[in-house]
Amino acid sequence: MSSAVATEPRRQTGVAVEQVVRRFGDRVVLDHLDLTIADEELVILLGPSGCGKSTLLRLLAGLDRPDGGRVEVPARRAIVFQSDRLLPWQRVLRNVTLGLHGPDADQRARDVLAEVGLSGRAKAWPKELSGGEAQRVSLARALVSEPELVLLDEPFAALDAITRLRMHDLVRALRTRHHAAMLLVTHDVDEAIALADRIVVMSNGRIGTSHDVHLPAADREVSVAREELRARLLEDLGLASQH
Amino acid sequence: MTELSLKAPAVSESPDTGTTSAREREVFLPRDARRRTPISTLRERLRWPLGIYTTPVAILIAWEVLARAGVLAKTYAPAPTSIVKSAADLWQQGVLGPDLAISLQRAGTGLAIGLTVGVSTGVLGGLLRSGEYLFNGLVQVLNTIPLLAVLPLMIVWFGIDELTKVLLISFGAGVPMYLNLFAAIRGVDQRLIEMARTTGAGTWRLVTRVLVSGALPGFLVGLRFSLAYSVLGLVAAETVNADKGLGFLITQGQTYLQTNQVFVGLVIYSLLGLLADQFVRALERVLLRWRPSYEAS
């Protein structure tokens, strides 16, 4: 595995995770996990808290290294964290242009801010933003570099229910403009059904089950298929017996 | 199906339910909804008309009154008005101006050297592990040596001329700047550094927009200490040996029992301290606008 060949990329697009192991001390969090994400696919990673969702996401982000196996991701990738992680000492615009270079950086940042509905807030300080606005800025910061892969780590978990629904609409709208593969980590089954092309459920440090979601937008709100999917997901999560 | 029986807490009808005295209630209204009479407006205005200068002004007035009443002897503590008069006299005699100029020049040179060294070592120490190993131990040792205790050694090494004075001031200014800047850079939120790395910001962006900007509050604390210690160093250096400068003015006044003159020097030192504080406050207002700050009511 440690030969030079292993560091050569094998695919052109998307994400490939092969037999990845990650342990903290004696505890094996990721146990020979496999996952592939196609180009422009939105995959939702579902699982109870503490099952290793964020650990996997950090591996994909390159923030941590695996203890075994192989992770291959595009070099152009961006992360949206659970908290907004805005620099409090920079205005909104400078927060968005943090990783951006070139003369058109400010204009590109303004364009993306307009896309997330914050065109008038470029000069605000982060302390003046509401929680939803701050998270939209961090979404803009991720998208402004036109990444091939966007990793979202429970990005809407700290938001209220109404703001969260608005953010779901926003993500759907952004997907039509930005052609990136996305991996969204959540523990919210309804959020998963609302957004996903494919839902994968984690259990015991591996991807347990995988569900392709081909529902039109209206059916994701209310339909028999939606309820069936929801029941199956709850069953995968080990919650079915309670219903 | 298991039967869950939750016993409802027994609600006993207290006899005084319904009477208003049992329950305290609070009503909040906009501040300007209260009745505004000319008297209340005046009282609001007069409450703290002097702000932070309230206590100093009160002391000055008490001092003046006591001095005029003859309670304080003239040789111990002359009245503030007479100190101001001596200052004006000294200025007109052409003594105060040059002395003040030479003192400010010493303080300025010492500060410039001390801050340059303090800031550059602080940034290097904060950013780099090797910088920490190079400077941190040394500065921690220097920090425990009292400023005044170094003075005799400096006189032996550098003589009694300007060099000793300037170096003492820069020593006083440099050490607190290094310590505060180092701590501030190391204290920048690790999650923000991680975030900046994931956006593809290079090392330069990380240093300028995240680490150095994030360390600004600590830098300003360091600056506050540096300015204060540089004035302290100035006083120490000038009092031991000087033939011109504010310290010389004070020593001379002491020799000839001109208490007025001693006080003029002291007042100018304290004004320098006040000016330094106001300068840092102004900087804070501009540089720390982003910070959600506590405002006392």
Image (cartoon, coloured by chain):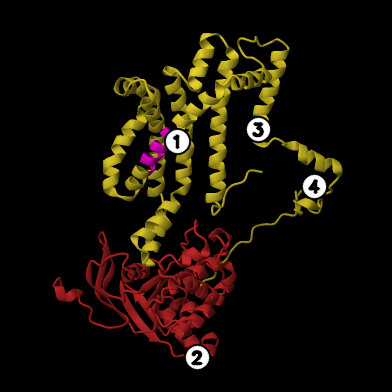
Chain colours: A red, B yellow
> In which quadrant of the rendered view does residue B173 lie?
top left
Q: Does the magenta stretch include residue B92?
A: no
Q: Give the range drawn in magenta.
A: B109-119
Q: Do the residues labelled 2 and 4 touch (CB within 8 Å)?
A: no
> Looking at the image, is mark 2 or mark 1 nearer the viewer?
1
Tag 1 and tag 4 share a subunit: yes
User: Residue beneath label 2, please?
Assistant: A216
Q: Which of A62 and B133 is in front in this view?
A: B133
Disc 1 marks a residue whose amino acid type is Ser
User: Residue beneath label 4, please?
Assistant: B21
User: Residue beneath label 3, please?
Assistant: B53
> Looking at the image, is mark 4 or mark 3 nearer the viewer?
3
The crowd level at tag 4 (other Cα within 10 Å; few <14, some 14-19, many 20+) is: few
Nearer-N-terminus badge (1/4):
4
Q: Is mark 2 on a helix, strand or loop?
A: loop
> Looking at the image, is mark 2 or mark 4 nearer the viewer?
2
**Chain ID for label 3?**
B
Q: Do the residues labelled 1 and 4 touch (CB within 8 Å)?
A: no
Q: Is residue B114 magenta?
A: yes
- The residue sitting at 47% across, 87% down in the picture is A228
Disc 2 marks a residue whose amino acid type is Pro
**What secondary structure predominates along the stretch shown in magenta?**
helix
Nearer-N-terminus badge (4/3):
4
The crowd level at tag 1 (other Cα within 10 Å; few <14, some 14-19, many 20+) is: many
The crowd level at tag 2 (other Cα within 10 Å; few <14, some 14-19, many 20+) is: few
Tag 2 and tag 1 share a subunit: no
